[in-house]
Amino acid sequence: EIGKAEVVADGTDVALIGLGTMFEMAEQTKALLEEKGYSVALINPRFIKPLDAAVIEEYGRKCRVVCTFEDHVIKHGFGAAVIELLHEAGIHTPVERIAWPDEFVEHGKPEILRDLHKLTAAEAVTKCLKHL
């Protein structure tokens, strides 16, 4: 159904929302956080528009931090839309974003560029742990 997110796993500490090709990185992040003893929700939004406000708000309230993953620049992207949605709902849970920097990114192999720009599961864990 268009506009309906898929909740792959429920959790109460961290909500990971992995869009498109970055969903796999969200899965890797989930495994790393669970190894540390955290309860981790994993959400596949499936669509950028319309966002599933009900699911995002539910996990924004339920979890201590939300982390979005997208293969897009950090400015004005999916993560920004999630922040805006939560803010407008009066939910002030911290949101961390794993996305490309808002600058020219050189050409190269995606896995090398992701490491170079800290688009990794390990970096996502570091960002989430700041709020736990």
Image (cartoon, rainbow, N blue to C red):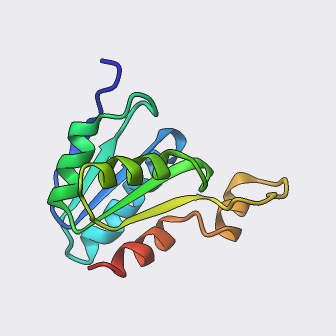
Residue drawn at (35%, 19%) of the image: 2
Residue 87 position, x and y percent, is 32, 55
For the N terminus, the quadrant is: top left
18 or 30: nearer the viewer: 18
Residue drawn at (36%, 34%) of the image: 51
- Count of labels shown? 0
Residue 80 shown left or right of residue 116 in the figure: left
Residue 10 position, x and y percent, is 16, 51
Q: Residue furthest top?
A: 1
Residue 53 position, x and y percent, is 27, 38
For the C terminus, the quadrant is: bottom left
Name the quadrant containing residue 101: bottom right
Residue 107 shown left or right of residue 132 in the figure: right
Residue 110 position, x and y percent, is 71, 53
Q: Is residue 83 above or below residue 13?
A: above
Residue 105 shown left or right of residue 83 in the figure: right
Q: Is residue 121 above or below residue 56?
A: below
Residue 7 shown left or right of residue 66 in the figure: left
